[in-house]
Image (spheres, rainbow, N blue to C red):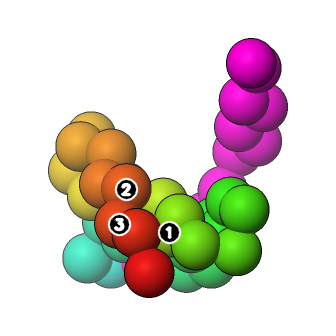
């Protein structure tokens, strides 16, 4: 399985301005170089 990640803008807090949703259940965000994946 391959995941393609394109360049995204971040706001002043370091969070992605547009979170990425995979499979309609997985929310992916980054802050300060740490990648967070949250299931919904």
Can residue 8 be seen in the rendering of this structure? yes
Answer yes or no: do the residues labelled 1 and 2 have beta carbons within 8 Å? yes
Write down the region rendered in magenta: 1-11
Give the image location of residue 17, x and y in percent. 55, 79
Name the residue carrying label 1: 27
Instruction: State the residue in front, 32 or 37.
Output: 37
Q: Quadrant of residue 15?
A: bottom left
Specify few, some or many for label 2: CA neighbours under 10 Å numbering under 14, 14-19, or 20 or more.
few
In this rendering, position of residue 19 left or right of residue 6: left
Q: CA distance from mark 2 to mark 3?
A: 4 Å
Give the image location of residue 11, x and y in percent. 43, 78
Q: Quadrant of the N terminus?
A: top right
Give the image location of residue 40, x and y in percent. 44, 81
Q: Tell me the SS state at disc 2.
A: strand
Q: CA distance from mark 1 to mark 3?
A: 5 Å
Answer yes or no: do the residues labelled 1 and 3 have beta carbons within 8 Å? yes
Name the residue carrying label 3: 38
In this rendering, position of residue 29 left or right of residue 2: left
Q: Tell me the SS state at disc 1.
A: strand
Q: Tell me the SS state at disc 3.
A: strand
Residue at (37% x, 56% y) in the render: 37
Instruction: State the residue in front, 12 or 3.
Output: 3
Q: Is residue 16 above or below residue 36?
A: below
Name the residue carrying label 2: 37
């Amino acid at each position: 399985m391959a995941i393609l990640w394109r360049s995204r803008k971040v706001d002043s807090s370091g969070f992605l301005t547009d979170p990425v949703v995979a499979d309609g259940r997985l929310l992916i965000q980054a802050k300060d170089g740490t990648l967070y994946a949250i299931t919904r």
